[in-house]
Amino acid sequence: MQECATKMSKKEEPKKTVKKTEAKTKPKAKAEVKEQKAPEVSVGKKTEDKNVVFVGAKPTMNYVLAVMTVFNQGANDVILKARGRATSRAVDTAEVVMKKFLSNEVELEDITIGTDAVGEGDDVRNISTIEITLKKK
């Protein structure tokens, strides 16, 4: 009788099924890096894009390093361009390069100021712009 009870208990147990699941992972696409060229600016004289440093929201010393890099690559002049609130940062960058890093080697050649209309329709605003040209002596 005990045999019968053990056989029944074994039969009553549900069969364990193992379901095979395959991990469906898609290979991630490699990020494509595209070179973006700076927009062309016609200010009266043709400038090379590689000698232009666009000043934005980063710390001033980042732009000082960019100017120093352009000069070390053999350029004779560098143009700092900025709009809006970044104009003071562009002026600070020019002053630091001229007074601290290349005090006897670089001089201020030209400063050009202007305005850009930004926006569409009724939301048109004027934003101040500045271009500072530094030249090696």
Image (tube, helix red, strand yellow):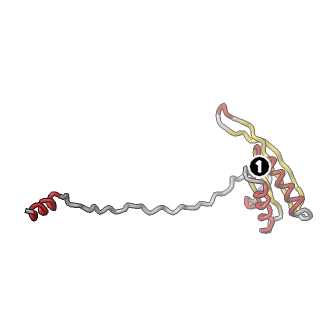
Quadrant of the image occupied by residue 101: bottom right
Residue visible at 14% across and 60% down?
Answer: 11
**Quadrant of image for the C terminus:** bottom right
Residue lying at the far top in this picture: please name it: 122
**Quadrant of image for the N terminus:** bottom left
In the image, taking residue 35 as reference, residue 134 lies left or right, namely: right
Residue lying at the far left in this picture: please name it: 1
**In terms of depth relative to the viewer, which is nearer, 33 or 58?**
58
**In terms of depth relative to the viewer, which is nearer, 47 or 74?**
74
Decide if residue 63 is in sight here: yes
As drawn, 126 above or below 2: above
**Residue under numbered circle 1:** 82
Q: How dense is the environment of label 1, judged by Cα within 10 Å: few (below 14), some, or many (20 and up)?
A: many
Quadrant of the image occupied by residue 113: top right
Residue visible at 65% across and 33% down?
Answer: 121
Quadrant of the image occupied by residue 99: bottom right
Position of residue 35 measured from the top left corner of the image (x, y, whole percent): 62, 60
**In terms of depth relative to the viewer, which is nearer, 125 or 62?**
62
In the image, taking residue 2 as reference, residue 114 lies left or right, namely: right
Residue lying at the far right in this picture: please name it: 104
Q: Secondary structure at mark 1?
A: strand
In the image, taking residue 99 as reference, residue 19 lies left or right, namely: left
**In terms of depth relative to the viewer, which is nearer, 4 or 116?**
4
In the image, taking residue 119 as reference, residue 64 lies left or right, namely: right
Position of residue 127 measured from the top left corner of the image (x, y, whole percent): 75, 40
Residue visible at 47% across and 61% down?
Answer: 28
As drawn, 116 above or below 38: above
- Residue type at mark 1 is Ala
Position of residue 105 measured from the top left corner of the image (x, y, whole percent): 89, 65
Decide if residue 52 is in sight here: no
Residue lying at the far front in this picture: please name it: 2
